[in-house]
Image: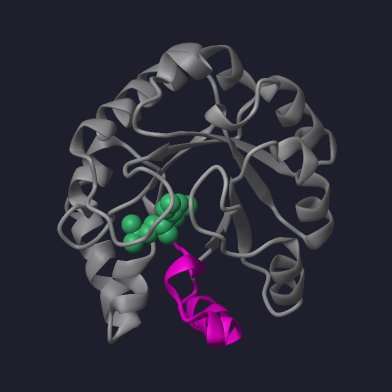
Amino acid sequence: MLKLAPSVLSCSFANVKKAVDEVDSLGLEYLHLDVMDGCFVPEITFGAKLVKDIRRYTDMTFDCHLMTVRPEDKIDAFIEAGADIITIHQEATVHLHRVLQRIKATGIKCGISIVPSTPVSAIMPLLEMADLVLVMTVNPGYGGQKLIQSCLDKVVELKEIREREDYSYLISVDGGVNLTTIQDVATAGADLAVTGSAFFGAEDKDAFIREMNRLIGECV
Ligand code: DX5
Ligand code: ZN
């Protein structure tokens, strides 16, 4: 069943620890951490120090989404900080295969992300080694954008490839996931869905997660 991964991008940075505790107390397995460098995307969020600082308070799976140029220069710090999954962008480095190999060699999981304008065919040779494929359903850089429906076709495509080739990656969807779009994401066949503004904007987060899970359950 599709699992939800709240993104700390949308919490108050004045109180990240409170947000982490909130997600943890709901029993959720994944925490999505959006790293923005002001170059690959216009905004700057945080680096490995924040990941390291919150690592000591939770055992949740840290799904670090690096929206940075030259991820090869940054992965060591995130591995050292305690990331469980490091996802890098196909568009951010020439030597994607080498960076993924380096991440895997340390024993943690590696993910590949594609922006809306990148087709699945661009990462075809790498799918064999991927633990996760992150399909961006908005152009990366900001929370609170509208999900681009056509990107969900890539989820269907990735699911078909995984079955045909007997690959094992998880398919994650990132951008514009909320109560209105979650059923389309579930029906497309995603395993994970990142939720930023919808989750942190919800007054009652427990009720929000229960409602999201109910909607997901209807799609099974
Ligand atoms: C956007 C980030 C997302 C973001 C999603 O560039 O990668 O993870 O937090 O936020 P929402 O759910 O508000 O679209
Ligand atoms: Zn993200």
Instruction: Identify the residue shown where x is 30% and y is 62%.
Output: 144
Q: Nearer the viewer, residue 218 or 79?
A: 79
The quadrant of the rendered image in which ligand 1 is seen is: bottom left
Specify the quadrant of the image occupied by residue 17. Answer: bottom right
The span shown in magenta is: 6-27
Residue at x-position 83% and y-position 47%:
76
Residue drawn at point x = 37 percent, y = 76 percent: 200
Residue 190, horizontal then vertical, whole percent: 36, 40
* 143 and 2: which is toward the camera: 143
| Residue name at image x 71 percent, y 21 percent | 95
Q: Is residue 142 above or below residue 199?
A: above
Dominant SS of magenta comes to helix
Residue 170 lies left or right of residue 46; in this view the side is left
Q: Quadrant of residue 188?
A: top left
Is residue 8 visible in the rendered image? The answer is yes
Lateral position of residue 2 relative to residue 51, left or right? left
Please determine whether, in this image, residue 51 is positioned above or below residue 73: below
Magenta span contains residue 22 = yes
Residue 180, by quadrant, is bottom left
* Placement of the C terminus among the 4 image quadrants: top left
How did the renderer colour the structure?
one colour
Residue 163: percent from left, percent from top: 42, 19
Q: Does the segment drawn in magenta span residue 125?
A: no
